[in-house]
Amino acid sequence: SETIKRAGELLRAAGAAGQLNFYGNVEGNDIFKGTTDIVVCDGFVGNVMLKASEGLAGMMGGFIKAEFKRDWLSRLAGLLALPVLQRFKHRVDHRRFNGAALLGLRGLVFKSHGSADAFAFEQALARAYDAARNRLLDRVHDRIVATLQTGAIDAGDNAATAAQAE
């Protein structure tokens, strides 16, 4: 869409001016390789990506468990591999990453997954607390204002964007 294209242009300009570290568009596999720390997308795309990732992780876990239960030799191999499998399970546990900040609002809002258990909800609360303690909203606001003042965004966009940032 035109909005996405324009946002990309603005982010590239801010990146070229040294105001942020902008990588650009990423492929789906970049999300999991760690090419970037943050991926920005609209809510629908983000939700589809998250749900598909969670589903894939659950499916793969089920496949691995089924294979290790196939016969006595596989069970023995599974027993030997248990420490590695437990570390892997911990590493891909989506509950550890629960809680997303919704930016662009006048208050601090964190969204938790609808199916979050107590552990996942605790993680979301910890993220919200960390954001409040580190003044996330103030820092984002100050960065936007500083970017507008340096002229990285052309004059036609300054008035509308500045009004939204205030």
Image (cartoon, grey):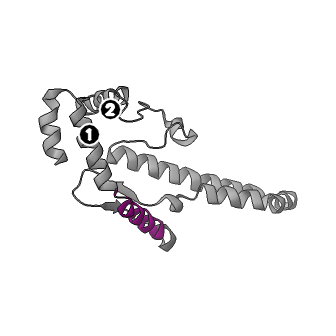
Packing grade of label 2 (10 A; few <14, some 14-19, many >=20) is many
Given residues 38 and 114, the one toward you in this image is 38
Whether residue 56 is situated above or below residue 157 in the rendered picture: below
Callout 1 amino acid: Ala
**Magenta segment:** 121-135
Given residues 81 and 13, the one toward you in this image is 13
Give the labeled residue for mark 1: 146
Mark 1: secondary structure: helix
Given residues 4 and 55, the one toward you in this image is 4
- Asked if residue 25 can be seen in this view, the reply is yes
Residue 158 appears at what percent x and percent y?
Answer: 16, 34
Mark 2: secondary structure: helix
Residue 131 placement: quadrant: bottom left
Residue 58 appears at what percent x and percent y?
Answer: 58, 56
Which one is closest to the eye, mark 1 or mark 2?
1
Callout 2 amino acid: Leu
Asked if marks 1 and 2 touch (Cβ < 8 Å), the reply is no
> Residue 11: which numbered mark, if any?
2
Majority SS type along the magenta span: helix
